[in-house]
Image (tube, rainbow, N blue to C red):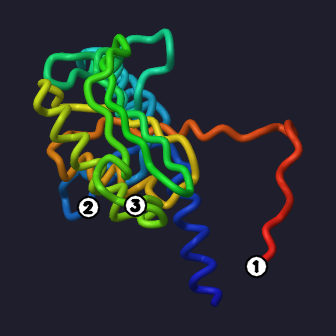
């Protein structure tokens, strides 16, 4: 134990000593500790290298904040120029509408228009089929990339997005726009099962 303590003290003393040149086997050798001046020189050289390097562009994988412009482009269009796919997922049905950046309707489908009836309209399979049909209609009008805005808590939320991607549309961003009251209207009475 005493040997380890002495070795630690030796290392501490050698580190605290100023840098010097020693002679080992007739050859001058510099000590292994780094002096303060060398640390400052190394830091200064790193700062010079950072200044010489080109500045990185303001790149972000996230969509821009409203009012800011993004350098990202998809098929030559900025984020604001990409069409929007609005998905309204209720418990009984799922509606999908693809609109242009200027809110001109391009395609609209729902589970009911795809041939599903009654309780089958509220399933994930029906929503996926509706998403696929909406993607095919939108691709027919030249849409390749789309932003998705989801509203509602129905079972077809993610299935509709999956249908859009299966139909050949590339989803750029997914935004949840589900309305929730801040203690607004009185809710309906609880269901008895």
The residue at the point 12 percent across, 25 percent down is: 142
Q: Which mark is residue 165?
A: none
Name which of mark 1 and mark 2 comes first in the sequence. Answer: 2
Provide the secondary structure element on which disc 2 rests. strand
Residue 84: give x, y in percent of width and height.
Answer: 35, 27
The residue at the point 56 percent across, 36 percent down is: 177
Quadrant of res 96: top left
The residue at the point 20 percent across, 25 percent down is: 74
Name which of mark 3 and mark 2 comes first in the sequence. Answer: 2
Residue 22: give x, y in percent of width and height.
Answer: 33, 53
Q: Which mark is residue 24?
A: 2
Residue 24: give x, y in percent of width and height.
Answer: 26, 61
Q: Is residue 1 left or right of residue 175?
A: right
Q: Nearer the viewer, residue 158 or 5?
A: 158
Looking at the rendered image, the disc whose residue lies closer to the viewer, 3 or 1, is 3
Provide the secondary structure element on which disc 1 rests. loop
Q: CA distance from mark 3 to mark 1?
A: 24 Å
| Classed neighbour count for the residue bearing mark 2: other residues with Cα under 10 Å, few (<14), some (14–19), many (≥20) | few
Q: CA distance from mark 1 to mark 2?
A: 90 Å
Q: CA distance from mark 3 to mark 2?
A: 92 Å
Q: Which residue is mark 1?
A: 193
Q: Is residue 59 left or right of residue 86?
A: left
């Amino acid at each position: 134990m005493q040997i380890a303590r002495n070795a630690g003290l030796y290392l501490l003393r050698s580190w605290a000593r100023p840098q010097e040149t020693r002679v080992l086997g007739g050859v001058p050798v510099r000590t292994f500790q780094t002096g303060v001046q060398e640390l400052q020189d190394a830091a200064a050289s790193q700062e010079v290298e950072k200044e010489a390097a080109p500045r990185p562009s303001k790149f972000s994988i996230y969509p821009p904040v409203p009012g800011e412009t993004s350098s990202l482009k998809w098929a030559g269009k900025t984020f604001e120029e990409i069409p929007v796919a609005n998905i309204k997922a209720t418990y009984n049905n799922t509606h999908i509408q693809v609109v242009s950046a200027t809110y001109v309707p391009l395609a609209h489908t729902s589970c009911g228009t795809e041939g599903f009836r009654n309780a089958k309209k509220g399933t994930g399979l029906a929503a996926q089929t509706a998403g696929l049909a909406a993607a095919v209609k939108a691709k027919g009008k030249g849409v390749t990339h789309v932003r998705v805005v989801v509203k509602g808590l129905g079972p077809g939320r993610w299935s509709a997005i999956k249908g859009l991607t299966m139909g050949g549309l590339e989803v750029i961003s997914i935004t949840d726009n589900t309305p929730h009251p801040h203690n607004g209207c009185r809710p309906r009475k609880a269901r008895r099962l």
